[in-house]
């Protein structure tokens, strides 16, 4: 418990359209889930103040929920500036969203972020287990390959592991995980 103070952390939430990025952010920030899907246009910026009990500090998280659609690819680079970490999100029911983490999202992120920072790999929608197309072993292997701090499965709908995913990334960034 040696650290104390106030921190401001900019985090990017990345992944294909429809994987649940906005729903994860909403669940983390306001413990809410909306059934109707509305695509993010460009970027959605949300702030949340959190208490970090393990290190006796507070942090303001600035969460950049970045649109997954192709038409926003040109402007995406500007959104990454100043990011200290990223949540790489895929949908466990859509294998293509898993593949795109490495071939699209991580590549794009590294292109614009000077110091890559900490990454966490998130398999979202684990409440849809009966529709799973991405196996946990594949995800664990990818997490190692891309040097993510961990792989975790979440459900933005049910709230499973959502807070844990965000907090684990924050503690890792602050060097006390």
Image (tube, grey):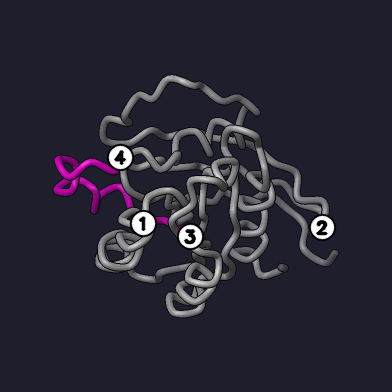
Percent across and percent down for residue 4 are 77, 57
Of the numbered discs 3 and 1, the one sitting upstream in the chain is 3
Percent across and percent down for residue 172 are 63, 66
Label 1 sits on residue? 95
Of the numbered discs 3 and 4, the one sitting upstream in the chain is 4
Is 95 placed left or right of 86 in the picture? left
Percent across and percent down for residue 7 are 62, 51
Label 2 sits on residue? 54
Is 80 placed left or right of 6 in the picture? left
Q: Residue at x 55, y 65 (%)?
A: 136
Percent across and percent down for residue 66 are 34, 42
Of the numbered discs 2 and 1, the one sitting upstream in the chain is 2
Of the numbered discs 4 and 1, the one sitting upstream in the chain is 4
Mark sitting on residue 67: 4
The residue closer to the viewer here, 144 or 48, is 144
Please rate how many residues cluster around mark 2, counting C-alpha atoms within 10 Å: few if below 14, some from 14 to 19, many from 20: few
**Which tag is nearer the camera, tag 3 or tag 1?**
1
Relative height, residue 138 to residue 63 (above, below): below
Quadrant where the N terminus is found in the figure: bottom right
Is 16 placed left or right of 31 in the picture? left
What kind of element bears circle 2? Answer: helix
Label 3 sits on residue? 85
Q: Residue at x 30, y 60 (%)?
A: 100
Quadrant where the C terminus is found in the figure: bottom right
């Amino acid at each position: 418990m040696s650290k104390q103070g106030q921190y401001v952390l900019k985090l990017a939430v990345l992944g294909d359209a429809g994987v649940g990025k906005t729903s994860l952010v909403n669940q983390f920030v306001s413990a809410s889930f909306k059934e109707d899907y509305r695509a993010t246009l460009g970027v959605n910026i949300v702030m949340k103040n959190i208490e970090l009990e393990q290190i006796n500090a507070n942090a303001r998280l600035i969460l950049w929920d970045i649109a997954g659609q192709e038409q926003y690819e040109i402007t995406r680079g500007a959104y990454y500036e100043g990011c200290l970490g990223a949540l790489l999100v895929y949908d466990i029911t859509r294998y293509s969203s898993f593949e795109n983490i490495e071939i699209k999202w991580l590549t794009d992120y590294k292109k614009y972020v000077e110091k890559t920072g900490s990454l966490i790999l998130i398999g979202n929608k684990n409440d849809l287990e009966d529709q799973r197309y991405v196996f946990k072993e594949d995800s664990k292997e990818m997490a190692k390959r891309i040097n993510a701090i961990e792989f975790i499965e979440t459900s933005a709908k049910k709230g499973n592991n959502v807070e844990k995913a965000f907090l684990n990334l924050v503690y890792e960034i602050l060097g006390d995980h």
